[in-house]
């Protein structure tokens, strides 16, 4: 006789509805997903759905918000300085690529940029991604200068491009690829620029490191 499940082993209704939404989006275009299909997949009733969400778009926003928030490694206490920027990049990439839960969130986020998505879902992805970056970098969303605003758009565009290609990249990209010197320099220079850090020490260190490597290789 199977052991009865405890309440703690049953996921809360909002999480079950979000998981059902992700499963359905993986198999269907967004505009074909219905509340009826979601509650049936989640094994809940419509009253449970409307208790937590006003409509399907609100469920989609909740799903993407949680996926975006949980896909970013928490920032360490205090400011990141130029001297440990590379270390922070390595820490984040290693955690992202080696954690199955993080890779699953990337798989899910890629659905919002993929063939089953919609313009509304893409905009939601961009909005939540932008807010996350602003909070991560401790910027004032109401007082962004033009350069920072453009850098945010540039970064989000790159992230969307990666997510669109994630289904083909997920089997090919490794931690070593992300820790490639050129990739790391580009990523950290964008980060430091938006976080208002003084770039001079960082670039001096990068260029000196490249010069030393060139001399050692005889180039």
Image (tube, rainbow, N blue to C red):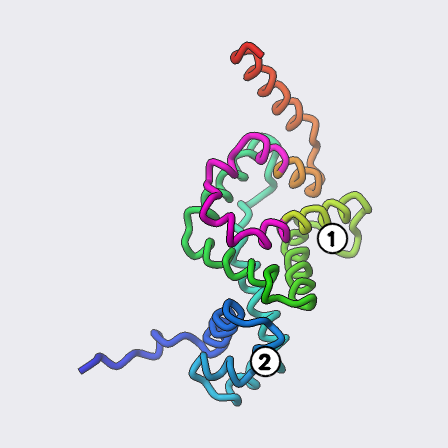
Q: Position of residue 187 (x, y in %)?
A: 62, 39
Q: Residue at x 79, y 52 (%)?
A: 143
Q: Decide whether residue 176 is among the magenta residues.
A: yes
Q: Earlier in the sequence, mark 1 or mark 2?
A: 2
The C terminus lies in which quarter of the figure? Answer: top right
Q: Decide whether residue 147 is among the magenta residues.
A: no
As drawn, 145 above or below 2: above
Q: Position of residue 36 (x, y in %)?
A: 53, 85
Q: Residue at x 52, y 73 (%)?
A: 21
As drawn, 51 above or below 77: below
Q: Residue at x 49, y 83 (%)?
A: 39
Disc assigned to residue 56: none
Disc assigned to residue 140: 1
- Crowd class of label 1 (few under 14; some 14 to 19; many from 20; radius 10 Å): few
Disc assigned to residue 53: 2
Image position of 10 (left or right of 121): left
Cα separation between marks 1 and 2: 30 Å
Q: Position of residue 100 (x, y in %)?
A: 41, 54
Q: Residue at x 74, y 55 (%)?
A: 141
Q: What is the tally of numbered marks visible in this picture?
A: 2
Local SS, label 1: loop
Local SS, label 2: loop
Occupied quadrant, residue 122? bottom right
Image position of 198 (left or right of 53): right
Image position of 20 (left or right of 154): left
Between 18 and 197, the residue placed more toward the observer is 18
The answer to whether the residues at label 1 and label 2 have Cβ atoms under 8 Å apart is no
Foreground tag (1 vs 2): 2
Between 61 and 82, the residue placed more toward the observer is 61
Residue range of the region highlighted in magenta in the rendering: 159-186
Magenta stretch, main secondary structure, is helix
């Amino acid at each position: 006789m199977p052991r009865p499940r405890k309440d703690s082993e049953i996921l809360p209704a909002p999480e079950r509805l979000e998981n059902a939404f992700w499963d359905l989006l993986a198999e269907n275009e967004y505009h074909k997903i219905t509340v009826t299909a979601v509650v049936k997949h989640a094994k809940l009733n419509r009253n449970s759905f409307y208790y937590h969400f006003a409509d399907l778009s609100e469920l989609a926003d909740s799903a993407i918000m949680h996926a975006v928030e949980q896909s970013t490694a928490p920032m360490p206490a205090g400011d990141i300085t130029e001297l440990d920027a590379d270390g922070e990049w390595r820490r984040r990439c290693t955690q992202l690529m080696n954690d199955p839960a993080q890779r699953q969130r990337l798989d899910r986020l890629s659905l919002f940029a993929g063939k089953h998505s919609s313009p509304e879902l893409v905009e939601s992805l961009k909005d939540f991604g932008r807010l996350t970056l602003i909070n991560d970098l401790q910027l004032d969303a109401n007082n962004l200068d033009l350069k920072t605003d453009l850098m945010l758009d540039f970064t989000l565009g790159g992230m969307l491009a990666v997510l669109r290609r994630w289904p083909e990249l997920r089997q090919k990209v490794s931690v070593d690829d992300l820790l490639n010197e050129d990739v790391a320099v580009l990523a950290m220079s964008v980060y430091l620029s938006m976080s208002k850090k003084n770039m001079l020490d960082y670039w001096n260190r990068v260029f000196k490191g490249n010069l030393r490597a060139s001399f050692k290789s005889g180039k």
